[in-house]
Image: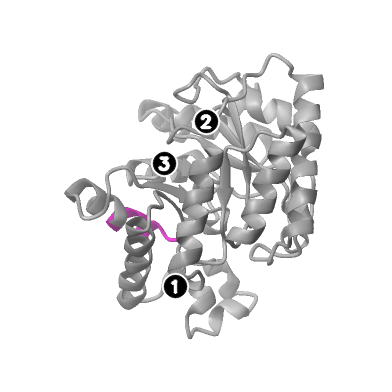
Amino acid sequence: MKATQDFLKKIGLPQGDDFALSSSEKRFPDGGQYRFEVPGIQGPGVMKTLLEEAKETGAVIHRVTQTKGIMLLSDAEISEMVSLAGKHKVDLVLSVGPRATYDTSASVNTPEGQRMGYRLRGQDQIVRAIEDIKRAAMLGCRSFLLYDEGHLWVLNEMRKAGEIPEACRFKISAHTGHGNPCSARLLELNGADSINPVRDIQLQMLAAIRQTINVPVDIHTENPASTGGFIRHYEVPEMIRVASPIYLKTGGSVAKTHSWDTSSEDAKKRIKQVHLVQRMIDQYYPEAKRSPKAEGK
């Protein structure tokens, strides 16, 4: 084992998981260690409720993520969500639509096929997924949730070539199933601007990933019932310390599934979860610095 560990060290990777839980000195461009993300906000109506509730109760939201897919939103809905994001100074992340959920494959509905996650099947699906991104970018969106490494690579090539706006940012979903430093490095090298490891990643694993990459990591502080339903609020202070810069994905336990149609009432419950997580930070890691607002990456 030592020879393998020595080689990993030689190429700039951790020799193993970081059980020492080393503190991260990396930060967002504004100096913040953490930001809040609320996932599963599927349309403009519920997004408006969420942001108004945040404003009324004093919750700070940096990023709002839609997970059902761009193709299920009308142009008017996308434009309204972009407008709301601008008004409330949050980053809007729209999810690519033509993934396995909307493909003709029945494999993803089987126990073994589910291992494929939401990856794209066939080059036609890549083309359609690129068209999804181009459409939303034309309507003003600049941040996108991706489920396929090949799709990430080609979008990064398009961004470099000026085929899509240079300001586009790509967030990798937990559904791609990555949970180690080598995979995280590969994603960063291929253009990922933030990476969501598997939901049940442990702190020592997270700390090792942070040593390997510079882009933000996105971590679920809680999860829908369909992905275990576990809540990690007490771990959040340590998540911030070892993995900053970090997006805290909060409010997921309100939903039954990843693509749950969040209601206005659910949106208010998600804001409550943000307050509960913030309380944990204030009590157990009060010196942690929260970004005042989202600023790009």
Q: Quadrant of residue 185?
A: top left
Along the polypeptide, which appears first: circle 1 or circle 3?
Answer: 1
Three-letter amino acid code at the position of disc 2 = Arg
Residue 34 colored in magenta in the image = no
* Gap in angstroms between the C-alphas marked 2 and 3: 14 Å
Q: Is residue 237 left or right of residue 99?
A: right
Nearer the N terminus, badge 2 or badge 3? 3
Neighbour tally class for label 1: few under 14, some 14-19, many 20 plus, Cα within 10 Å: many
Tell me which label, 2 or 1, sits earlier in the chain.
1
Quadrant of the image occupied by residue 151? bottom left
Return the x and y of residue 231 as percentages of the image width and height. Answer: 79, 45
Q: Which residue type carries mark 3? A: Asp
Q: Of residues 280 and 2, which is closer to you in this image?
A: 280
Asked if residue 15 lies left or right of residue 142, the reply is right
Indicate yes or no whether the magenta region holds residue 153. yes
Instruction: Say which element carries label 1.
Output: loop
Q: Which mark is residue 193?
A: 3
Q: Nearer the viewer, residue 46 or 120?
A: 46
Q: Position of residue 169 (x, y in %)?
A: 39, 45
Q: Quadrant of the C terminus?
A: top left
- Residue bearing mark 1: 98
Identify the magenta region.
147-154
Q: Which mark is residue 72?
A: none
In this rendering, the answer to whether 33 lies above or below 139 is above
Tell whether 158 sits left or right of 128. Answer: left
How far is disc 2 from disc 1 in space, using C-alphas?
A: 31 Å
> How many C-alpha atoms fall within 10 Å of the one at disc 3: few (<14), some, or many (≥20)?
many
- Residue 99 location (% of width, % of height): 47, 71
222 sits to left or right of 244: right
* Residue hosting label 2: 210
Q: How many marks?
A: 3
